[in-house]
Image (cartoon, rainbow, N blue to C red):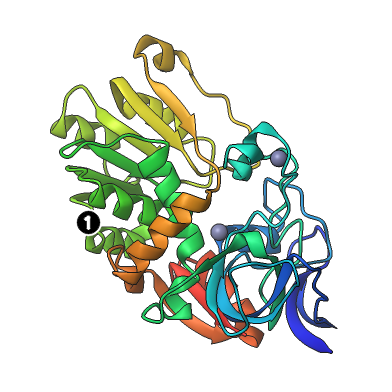
Amino acid sequence: MTQSAVVQYALEPLAVELREIAVPEIGERDVLLRVGAVSVCGSDVHQAYNTHSWPVAVPVVLGHEFAGTVAQVGRAVKGFREGDRVVSETAAEVCGDCVLCRTGRYNLCPTRKGFGYGIDGAMASYVKVPGRCLHHIPDSLPFGLACLAEPHAVAFNAICVNSTIRPGDLVVVIGPGPIGLLCARMAALAGANPLVVVGLSNDRPRLDTATRLGATRVIDAQLESVEDAVRGFNPLGADLVCDASGASRPLDLALTLARPDGQITKVGWSPDLVPVNINPLVQKNVRLQGSFSHNYPIWERVIHLLDRRLTLPDAIVGLTSPLDGWREAFDAMHDGRVIKSVLVP
Ligand SMILES: [Zn+2]
Ligand SMILES: [Zn+2]
């Protein structure tokens, strides 16, 4: 049996095409998932333009943000049956033996391989998924929103696990891409106020969405001074700066904006290496925290948030398309015309 899939076949810009490939065979610990919806990640777009910061094993089917129906179940899989509606975590392969795996932080396993770059992903009719990656979703949560659980989990980990926010904290989110906007929404839910979201002039529509998601102030950094605006709220600076831009340079700005004894959480990354003056980190006793991926309890929580629509997920999805419209779905995100595209295979 064959299926259409969006395949990255080389490490060059736009080496991506719709291909006929075999439907995967499952092992005894896997399920075969009929993909109900798969959202396009900034990382899929980066891979398509060959501007990613992680190793990609080509050829590979793209897509790691997905929901669907269990179509076939391996003999050793417990707790899931044919017809179950599920979402899947992204750690397709982990060692299972290291201290991180054994303590539930398998997202940080050094051997981790994720769907869509190390293992075939979900931009296809069917995807093979280890049973341990699955979570049930309620019938009240449609696939077109459930697929957003993965970027939700990234934002929840960055803002609600790796950062500390108390009601009334001054929080700044740099970079209003999908992850930045979801980080802003998580910060709003956690009680951040004022909540400032910073972007560039071509981010205008995304900054408007940030306001809908709970930002109390949005700043076009090309038109006004972010530092002046933040110090207008508190002369000491921000309690938390979340850098969700896909670049390294804004770490300088984050170090400027964080108040003494404040925090910086960096969730966006890029291949650029830039010199940064790290001295304010020491001088201000700032905690700089990276945030990567997510694990089981985070997924259970974001499924609840999505089901209750507490994160206003409808504000994020701008385009829904069949698989053969993948190019427009990617370009619309790349050009900033939509925040998030969803493919329905
Ligand atoms: Zn993603
Ligand atoms: Zn491990």
Q: Is residue 256 above or below residue 105?
A: above
Q: Which residue is mark 1?
A: 214
Question: What residue is shown at x 27% (from left), y 37% (from top)?
Answer: 165
Indicate the quadrant where residue 30 lies.
bottom right
Q: Residues within 10 Å of mark 1 (few under 14, many from 20)?
A: many
Residue extending farthest to the top is 283
Residue 110 left/right relative to 234? right
Q: Is residue 156 left or right of residue 128?
A: left
In this rendering, does residue 39 appear at all? Answer: no
Percent position of residue 225, x then y? 27, 37
Taking 316 as reference, is 321 above or below it?
below
Q: Is residue 327 above or below residue 159?
A: below
Q: Looking at the rendering, in which quadrant would you find the N terminus?
A: bottom right
Residue 288 in view of the camera: yes
From the viewer's side, name the closer residue of 257 and 308. Answer: 308
Q: Quadrant of ligand 1?
A: bottom right
Quick one: 3 or 326, which is closer to the camera?
3
